[in-house]
Amino acid sequence: MQRKKFPGPDRRHLIRPGRSMQLRIESSVGYRDGSNLPTFVNLEWAGRVGHPSSYGLLGGTRARQPELRIWTSTSPFRQSLAGSADEVFWGLPAEYEEAIERTLADQASAVNVGTAAHGMVGSSNLVFMRLTTLLCRLLGAGIPTDDDDVWRLLDSCWSEK
């Protein structure tokens, strides 16, 4: 019996032209379920670093039912896109977790969120609600290959009510 080879993680670092905005996407496709959809996606977004609602990191996997099980640590995330403009820590405060759970309940794709980091200054409920929406869309439909399409998808998550 021949074993399937699974591709390694795909890492993209997008920098939006003309704006101080960055997005890191790490994903992998496993094919175990017969699809070419990502089995996991990690997103790290930074807007105007150091300002409110400017940073978040969220990652998860496709699931049968939405679930939130975030690994928490008191260790800072020193390689974050926020850099020295904000102190970023692994895990989330309860208010951000509640925002994620509410957003997960409204999504078409079920996701198990297991990775998150927040900035002491730059994170907010809004950031994590929008990253949850983007995460669900990418896991449910795949990651566009064109960077402009990724930015349009991100913009659509930010413009939702």
Image: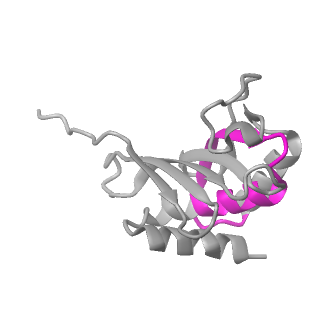
Which residue extends farthest right? Answer: 95
Q: Would residue 115 be counted in the magenta stretch?
A: yes
Q: Is 133 above or below relative to 123?
A: below
- Tell me the quarter of the picture where residue 110 sits: bottom right
Q: Position of residue 47 (x, y in %)?
A: 69, 58
Q: Residue at x 80, y 46 (%)?
A: 97
Q: Would residue 108 be counted in the magenta stretch?
A: yes
- Residue 46 makes an appearance in the image: yes
Instruction: Tell me the quadrant of the picture where the C terminus can be found.
Output: bottom right
Q: Position of residue 74 (x, y in %)?
A: 77, 22
Along the line of sight, the residue nearer the viewer: 131 or 37: 131
- Tell me the quarter of the picture where residue 94 sits: top right
Q: Residue at x 73, y 76 (%)?
A: 160
Write down the region rendered in magenta.
106-135
Does 77 sit left or right of 42 as displayed? right
Along the line of sight, the residue nearer the viewer: 86 or 31: 86
Q: Residue at x 67, y 39 (%)?
A: 83
- Residue 65 makes an appearance in the image: no
Does 12 sit left or right of 99 as displayed? left
